[in-house]
C-alpha cells in the first residue's frame, strides 16, 4: 500500500495519475495548501521542502519519497512499467520527463503566478512566461510529429507533461495550430486511469473558474505564495 500526500495541482496529479496507470493500491491524504498544512512539522518531516506530493511505501519499510520526478521513477521501477529498464527508450523517457520538470512545470507555474495571482499585472513579465510556455508547447508538438507518444510507448514522460499542459487555459497560453499536441492531449484524456488520477484528491471545477469562485481561489493562491 502506498500513502499519497497530495493536493489537486498538476504536480499532485503527476503522482496520482501514475498510481492509477500502474494499478497500485494507495491511500489518499489530502493536504490543505491554503491553510499551510504542507508547512507543518509533521509534513516537513517527510519533505523538508514543504511541497506536495509525497508518497510513503508501506511495503518498503515506510520509504518516503518527495519530488514528483523521483516519485514517478520509483513507482515505474517498482512495477516494471511505464519506464524501460535500459536502452534508447529509457533515455528518451528521462529526457522528456526532465523537459517537463525543468521547463513546462516551472514556466507554466510562473505564468500562473503573474497572469492569475500576482496583485500587480506586469505585462512584460506575463508575456515573457506565456511566450516561453507557448515555445515549449511547440517543442512538444514537434516531438510528437512522427510518433504516438513522446518516447516509444506511453510512459511517465507523457503523464508528467500532460498533467501540466492540460491546464493551459489557466496559464493563458494558446495551443492553436499545434495538431500533434492536440492529438496527444486527446489520446491521453481518453485513458480511464488518467481521467481517474486528475480527480484526486477531489474533482476539479468542471470549467475554468469565474467571478467569486475565481477570486476566492486566487486569494488562497496568493496566501500560498507567501508561505
Image (cartoon, helix red, strand yellow):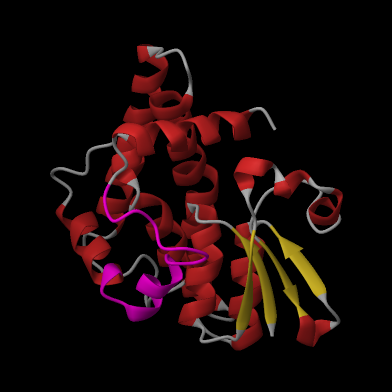
Q: Is residue 221 above or below residue 5?
A: above
Q: Image point 80% across, 47% down: which residue? A: 40
**Which one is nearer the viewer's eye here, 146 or 47?**
47
Q: Answer with left or right where residue 181 lies relative to residue 85.
A: left
Question: Residue 78, how many percent across, how many down?
Answer: 66, 83
Residue 16 can be seen, yes or no: yes
Question: Residue 16, how many percent across, how many down?
Answer: 53, 69
Placement of the N terminus among the 4 image quadrants: bottom right
Question: Residue 117, how many percent across, how many down?
Answer: 46, 27
Considering every residue shown, the one lying at the far front of the view is: 212
Magenta segment, prevailing SS (helix, strand or loop) = loop
Which quadrant of the view contains residue 77? bottom right
Q: Is residue 125 above or below residue 214?
A: above
Count every numbered label the image shows and give the total: 0
Q: Image point 32% across, 52% down: which residue? A: 140
**Which one is nearer the viewer's eye here, 113 or 182?**
113
Highlighted range, magenta = 189-207
Q: Image point 53% across, 35% down: which residue? A: 221
User: Would you say residue 197 sits in the magenta stretch?
Assistant: yes
Q: Is residue 9 above or below residue 75?
A: above
Q: Answer with left or right where residue 134 lies relative to residue 54.
A: left
Question: Residue 50, how many percent across, how many down?
Answer: 74, 46
User: Would you say residue 148 sits in the magenta stretch?
Assistant: no
Placement of the C terminus among the 4 image quadrants: top right
Residue 83 can be seen, yes or no: no
**Which one is nearer the viewer's eye here, 1 or 158?**
1
Q: Image point 51% across, 83% down: which residue? A: 22
Amino acid at each position: 500500500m502506498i500513502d499519497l500526500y497530495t493536493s489537486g495541482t498538476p504536480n499532485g496529479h503527476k503522482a496520482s495519475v501514475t498510481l492509477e496507470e500502474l494499478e497500485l493500491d494507495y491511500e489518499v491524504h489530502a493536504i490543505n495548501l491554503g491553510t499551510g498544512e504542507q508547512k507543518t512539522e509533521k509534513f516537513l518531516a517527510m519533505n523538508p521542502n514543504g511541497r506536495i506530493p509525497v508518497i510513503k511505501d508501506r511495503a518498503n519499510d515506510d520509504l518516503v519519497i518527495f519530488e514528483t520526478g523521483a516519485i514517478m521513477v520509483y513507482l515505474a521501477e517498482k512495477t516494471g512499467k511505464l519506464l524501460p529498464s535500459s536502452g534508447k527508450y529509457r533515455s528518451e523517457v528521462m529526457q522528456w520527463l526532465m523537459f517537463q520538470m525543468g521547463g513546462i512545470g516551472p514556466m507554466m507555474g510562473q505564468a500562473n503566478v503573474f497572469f492569475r495571482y500576482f496583485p500587480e499585472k506586469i505585462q512584460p513579465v506575463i508575456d515573457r512566461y506565456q511566450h516561453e510556455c507557448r515555445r515549449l508547447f511547440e517543442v512538444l508538438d514537434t516531438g510528437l510529429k512522427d510518433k504516438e507518444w513522446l518516447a516509444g510507448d506511453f510512459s511517465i514522460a507523457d503523464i508528467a507533461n500532460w498533467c501540466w499542459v492540460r491546464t493551459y487555459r489557466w496559464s493563458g497560453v494558446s495551443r492553436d495550430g499545434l495538431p500533434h499536441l492536440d492529438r496527444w492531449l486527446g489520446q491521453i484524456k481518453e485513458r480511464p486511469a488518467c481521467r481517474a488520477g486528475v480527480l484526486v484528491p477531489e474533482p476539479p471545477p468542471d470549467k475554468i473558474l469565474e467571478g467569486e469562485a475565481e477570486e476566492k481561489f486566487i486569494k488562497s493562491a496568493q496566501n500560498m505564495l507567501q508561505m
